[in-house]
Amino acid sequence: VTREKMDSLALLISRFLFDEELCAQAGRSISLVELMRLYDEHDDEGGAAALSPTGGVLATSGRGAVTLWDTSEWQPIRRLPDVHGPLAFSPDGRILATGSHERVVLWSLDEERRTVLHDSAVPLQGIFPGGTRVVFLGDGDTVLAPHVEKSERGVFYLGIWDAGSGAELGMLPDSPADKGHSGMITSLAYDREGGLLSSSSWDHSVRVWEVEPRRLMRT
């Protein structure tokens, strides 16, 4: 079992076993045995998991696919082939972001439609344990994820994409005056209410960004 998988499992256990509101939304609580059963069925290198905002759907990756589970009955409801983690739900739970062998892919859960983020790269699957590496901004209209290569300015940076078209809209850092990471970006944390984003890196630093107007707040 990988460290990344254990980190994801620990987060799910803490949410389900200690969040009474989430358990009520999901219809019933899940036992540790049930969580382990789901993970045993996806016992793969770099396995990941994500819970929808309402708690109604659990996404797990493994064995070359992502499976969506109905948390009221703990039965699989959909399988997305040839994709893997990282995994992230949009704020309304209607879109799931996954990694693939080439790009980050957005899957509509209401219809058979998917959007590939142009010139995106799978954010460090299986290299760094735990962490979030795909973030939906605002109401979910835009997506942010790290690029795995340096920009023309010689720093590692974050791309911002339109969730509908998959077109890249911009980057962080946006200004040459803002110093970017010198090492690969390993994890992200987004404060939706405050509009602030934190990024950690292999350069042993954490940077706090103001998403609008795309500027560095502090290191």
Image: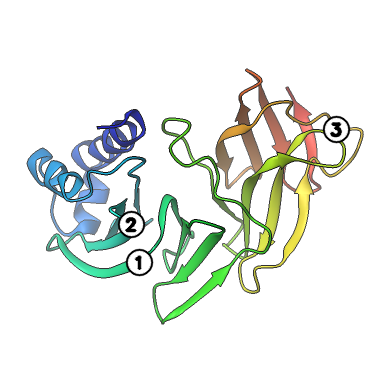
Instruction: Return the residue at label 3.
Output: 178
Residue at 10% over, 43% down: 31
N-term-proximal mark, 1 vs 3: 1
Quadrant of the drawing holding the C terminus: top right
Tag 2: residue type? Gly
Q: In the rendered image of this protein, does residue 28 appear above or below residue 10?
A: below
Circle 2/circle 1 CB separation < 8 Å: yes
Report the side of 179 relative to 5 (left or right): right
Crowdedness of circle 1 by 10 Å Cα count: few (<14), some, many (20+)? few
Which marked residue is nearer to the observer: mark 1 or mark 3? Answer: 1
Q: Residue at x 55, y 37 (%)?
A: 189
Residue tagged by mark 1?
Answer: 81
Mark 3 residue type: Asp
Mark 2, residue position: 64
Kindly state the secondary structure of the residue where label 1 is placed. Answer: strand
Residue furthest right in the image: 177
The label number, if any, that marks residue 101 in the structure image: none
83 relative position to 212: left or right: left
